[in-house]
Image (tube, rainbow, N blue to C red):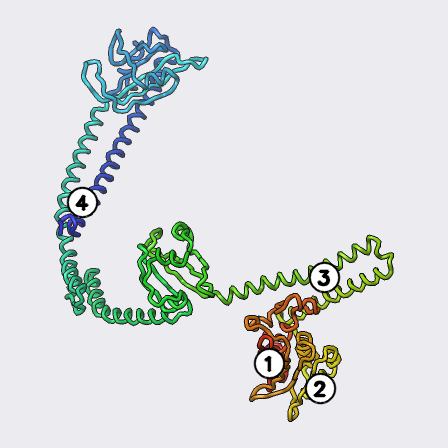
């Protein structure tokens, strides 16, 4: 292992860095603090010195006497040691100075003087320049303007103090801090090495045991030598090695369970990795796709079933993408959902397949139902409007034509009323708002009366309508009016859709749970493809003929709902061209319903 990758090396570097940062920060703070203290002290002295020159020399004095007065001031008790004072006129020329006795006076063009000539007080800190003897020194300077009555700069008092001793003291402090930093780093290297060795020794042993553990040898134990964090880590390693085998067995069992769940789901599941390679597919998915051996990549899968190539583009932006496609007579929905390794990196895609054939059929039926309702209402409304407009245009004056048109309008209004009545009745069934008035009904007697009522219609078509009574009394509990509606509807349909001279037989059978009332005719019959749909709302086998006969297309749908709310059912058997047998199943155990049954 490279020494730079060793934790021992990293710990030493970390301690060195920490000590170095602490020493640099603390040393810098000490230096800056000392420097600020000395600067503030010098600034206070210079401000006081400048104020005294202004008060004792300039205020009330004569410019010609400034040099004499300034020398007296510097020699008097008011002066501050190592401090020089100068008076500069508004043109920037020195007219008095404590550093020389007579002219020529030293000229000053530093930034503080320039600022003072502009009317601003200013300090210069640790500027290096020569004194009157030509020696280079560090100075702290201060220039303050003296204004006349009009607010203009009349004089500038420029004072400076020798800061060489202060500079030397700060440099000595800096050297002391550097030596302390060096000694601290040396001591840190030694102590860091000792400390790092106490940590890395047990870690190296743990690393060796972990390598053996990774090869499959789970019986690894490390001797615990301390009670600190390293000792706790060692105990945790020993516990981990003993628990690892048990956990691996648990994971293996869970994986087997997951495999069983995936293969027994009602939805198909296909998973791909980020490269589009197949990871897993369950048997349900293969059954839905009608493929016995599924071994397709993601690209092959979407190409084979002609799925949208936009999946490649959109899958990164959407949490999932849903695509519906046909398989034979089935409709399958594929839900593409990516799963991520990191926040924005896709690790693969899971495809969940659902068979929505039944749901799509229901949706198509709903759309067809809406279309049928619209059509059924539009036709009579169009007729009513047309005849009404004709009457309004003058036909009402012809009594014979007016009566004929009004009769047609009345018939169309009745037709719409029947349609609305049937729709409201179906709506009440759908919303569980039906209340039954259940009574005991003698089925033999009741059917006989119903057949007599419909006999006249059958005889008009020379049909033979008859009922074969059951050989014993048959009593059922039902709502007489609603059951009568079902029976009349089926008998009327048999009469309508049977040719002249057809035979319509009504008879009763029974099994352990039901009485079965069958109406069997020798009429036109129902095509095999139409049989599963004849109880759908508005569905007609022969649409033109059924509408011409005045039906709403809802009779059998209502009959089915009535039989089901009586806990029975209605079934049909038919052969096209030979006849139809409609059977109503009456539950022997039905005694009535309550609100709970309607939920």
User: Could you classify mark 1 by the number of other residues whose Cα lies within 10 Å: few (under 14), some (14-19), or many (20 or more)?
Assistant: many
Would you place residue 528 above or below residue 74 in this image?
A: below
Comparing labels 1 and 3, the label whose residue is closer to the camera:
3
Q: Secondary structure at mark 1?
A: loop
Where is residue 416? Give x, y as percent.
Answer: 72, 65
Image quadrant of residue 405? bottom right
Disc number for residue 568: 1
Comparing labels 3 and 4, the label whose residue is closer to the camera:
3
Callouts 2 and 4 close, C-beta under 8 Å: no
Quadrant of the frame with the C terminus: bottom right
Q: Nearer the viewer, residue 110 or 393?
A: 393
Disc number for residue 16: 4
Q: Earlier in the sequence, mark 1 or mark 4?
A: 4
Q: Earlier in the sequence, mark 3 or mark 4?
A: 4
Residue drawn at 23 percent across, 68 percent down: 244
Q: Secondary structure at mark 3?
A: helix
Q: Nearer the viewer, residue 579 or 137?
A: 579
- The residue under label 3 is 380
The Cα atoms of the two marked residues, 1 and 3, are separated by 35 Å
Image quadrant of residue 211? bottom left
- The residue under label 2 is 448
Comparing labels 1 and 4, the label whose residue is closer to the camera:
1
User: Could you classify mark 2 by the number of other residues whose Cα lies within 10 Å: few (under 14), some (14-19), or many (20 or more)?
Assistant: some
Comparing labels 2 and 4, the label whose residue is closer to the camera:
2
Where is residue 535? Give x, y as percent.
Answer: 60, 72
User: Could you classify mark 4 by the number of other residues whose Cα lies within 10 Å: few (under 14), some (14-19), or many (20 or more)?
Assistant: some
Q: Nearer the viewer, residue 400 or 425?
A: 400
Q: Earlier in the sequence, mark 1 or mark 2?
A: 2
Residue drawn at 32 percent across, 55 percent down: 274
Q: Earlier in the sequence, mark 2 or mark 3?
A: 3
């Amino acid at each position: 292992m490279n020494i730079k990758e060793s934790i021992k090396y990293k710990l030493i570097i970390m301690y060195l860095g920490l000590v170095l940062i602490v020493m640099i920060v603390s040393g810098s703070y000490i230096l800056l603090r000392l420097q600020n203290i000395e600067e503030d002290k010098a600034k206070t002295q210079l401000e006081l010195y400048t104020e005294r020159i202004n008060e004792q020399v300039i205020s009330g004095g004569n410019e010609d006497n400034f040099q004499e007065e300034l020398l007296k001031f510097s020699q008097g008790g008011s002066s501050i040691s190592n401090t020089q004072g100068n008076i500069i006129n508004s043109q920037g020329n020195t007219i008095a100075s404590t550093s020389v006795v007579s002219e020529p006076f030293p000229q000053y063009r530093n930034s503080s003087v320039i600022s003072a000539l502009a009317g601003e007080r200013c300090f210069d800190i640790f500027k290096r320049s020569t004194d009157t003897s030509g020696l280079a020194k560090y100075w702290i300077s201060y220039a303050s303007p003296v204004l006349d009555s009009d607010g203009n700069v009349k004089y500038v008092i420029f004072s400076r103090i020798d800061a060489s001793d202060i500079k030397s003291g700060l440099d000595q402090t800096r050297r002391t801090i550097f030596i302390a930093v060096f000694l601290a780093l040396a001591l840190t290297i030694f102590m860091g090495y000792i400390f790092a060795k106490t940590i890395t020794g047990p870690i190296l042993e743990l690393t060796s045991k972990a390598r053996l553990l990774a090869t499959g040898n789970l019986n690894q134990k490390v001797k615990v030598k301390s009670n600190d964090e390293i000792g706790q880590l060692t105990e945790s390693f020993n516990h981990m090695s003993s628990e690892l085998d048990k956990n691996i067995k648990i994971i293996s069992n869970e994986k087997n369970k997951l495999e069983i769940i995936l293969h027994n789901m009602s939805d198909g599941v296909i998973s791909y990795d980020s490269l589009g390679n197949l990871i897993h597919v369950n048997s349900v998915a293969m059954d839905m796709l009608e493929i016995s051996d599924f071994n397709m990549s993601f690209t092959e899968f979407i190409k084979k079933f002609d799925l949208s190539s936009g999946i490649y583009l959109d899958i990164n932006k959407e949490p999932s993408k849903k695509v519906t496609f046909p398989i034979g007579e089935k409709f399958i929905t594929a839900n593409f959902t990516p799963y991520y390794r990191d926040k924005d990196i896709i690790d693969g895609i899971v495809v969940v397949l659902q068979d929505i054939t039944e749901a799509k059929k229901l949706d198509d039926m709903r759309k067809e139902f809406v279309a049928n309702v619209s059509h059924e209402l539009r036709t009579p409304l169009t007729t009513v409007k047309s005849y009404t407009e004709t009457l309004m245009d003058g036909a009402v004056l012809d009594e014979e034509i007016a009566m004929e048109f009004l009769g047609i309008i009345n018939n169309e209004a009745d037709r719409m009323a029947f349609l609305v009545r049937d729709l409201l009745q179906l709506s009440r069934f759908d919303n569980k708002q039906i209340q039954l008035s259940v009574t005991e009904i003698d089925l033999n007697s009741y059917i006989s009366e119903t057949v007599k009522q419909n006999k006249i219609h059958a005889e008009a078509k020379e049909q033979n309508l008859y009922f074969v009574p059951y050989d014993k009394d048959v009593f059922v509990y039902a709502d007489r009016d609603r059951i009568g509606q079902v029976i009349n509807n089926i008998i009327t349909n048999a009469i309508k859709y049977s040719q002249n001279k057809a035979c319509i037989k009504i008879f009763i059978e029974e099994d352990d749970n039901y009485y079965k009332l069958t109406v069997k005719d020798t009429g036109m019959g129902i095509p095999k493809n139409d049989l599963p749909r004849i109880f759908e709302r508005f569905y007609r086998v022969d649409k033109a003929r059924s509408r011409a006969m005045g039906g709403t297309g809802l009779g059998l749908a209502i009959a089915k709902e009535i039989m089901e709310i009586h806990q029975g059912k209605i079934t049909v058997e038919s052969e096209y061209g030979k006849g139809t047998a409609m059977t109503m199943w009456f539950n022997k155990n039905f005694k009535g319903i309550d609100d709970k049954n309607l939920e």
